[in-house]
Amino acid sequence: MNEGVEGKEPDETSMDDVLKRYLEIQKQEQSLKEEKAELQTALGVYMTKIQREQWYPDLDGQKLNVRCRESTSIEYNEELLQQRLADRYSSLLEPDIRKIRKSLKDVSPLLQPMIDRIGSPSAGKVRSAIEAGVVQKEEFAGAFEKTTKRNVSVMRMRMGNSEN
């Protein structure tokens, strides 16, 4: 279905068809994801039953590789542990990239001595340095790749949230 997308200028009428099809696909996709999860569960149960992490069945002449690995994650109640362990709590900690990201403005000055090992060029800083004459634009020729990505999403609006 490329009408309205390629070849001719899209208009609102053709976009209605595009949006209808998009919503149909979204619904099918959700159904397929649910079915796939059920099938993965069934495969996982079977793999546990045969006590194997890998299985190489032959299905209609096609060799498959089925893997089943379990991983365990632990989420701690940090407030409770801080209360219970007091000063001993900090001896259990290691850097958490999510928390560092949240506190990056506060942490950045502390990381400055290691910036050559942990940093990457910032487009904003590069632009500012070029504008200030600290570096020349030509010095960046062939030293970067610019990629533009377009993300389009379509979601159903809840009643009462409609906009025209």
Image (cartoon, rainbow, N blue to C red):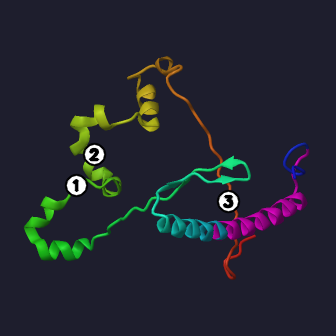
Q: Label 3 sits on what residue type?
A: Ser
Q: Please, which residue is most extreme toward the top here?
A: 138
Q: Position of residue 104 (x, y in %)?
A: 32, 51
The residue that mark 3 highlights is 153
Mark 3 or mark 2: which is in front? 3
Residue kind at label 1, given as amino acid type: Glu
Q: Residue 160 location in percent, x, y? A: 68, 82
Label 2 neighbour load within 10 Å: few <14, some 14-19, many 20+: few
Mark 1 element type: loop
Relative horizontal placement of residue 154, taking residue 92 as reference (left or right)? right
The amino acid on which the numbered mark 2 sits, given as a three-letter code, is Ser
Q: Earlier in the sequence, mark 3 or mark 1?
A: 1
- Write down the residue under mark 2: 108
Q: Which residues fall within the magenta stretch?
A: 8-34
Left/right placement of residue 143 relative to residue 114 reads right
Mark 3 Cα-neighbour bin, 10 Å: few <14, some 14–19, many ≥20: few
> Residue tagged by mark 1?
94
Q: Are marks 1 and 2 in contact (CB under 8 Å)?
A: no
- Label whose residue precedes the other's in the sequence (3 or 2): 2
- Quick check: 100 above or below 155? above
Judging depth in this view, the residue of 118 and 39 nearest the camera is 39
Q: Secondary structure at mark 3?
A: loop
Spot occupied by residue 145 in the image (x, y as percentages of width and height): 55, 29
Residue 159 located left or right of residue 77: right
135 inside magenta stretch: no
Q: Quadrant of residue 25?
A: bottom right
Q: Quadrant of the C terminus?
A: bottom right
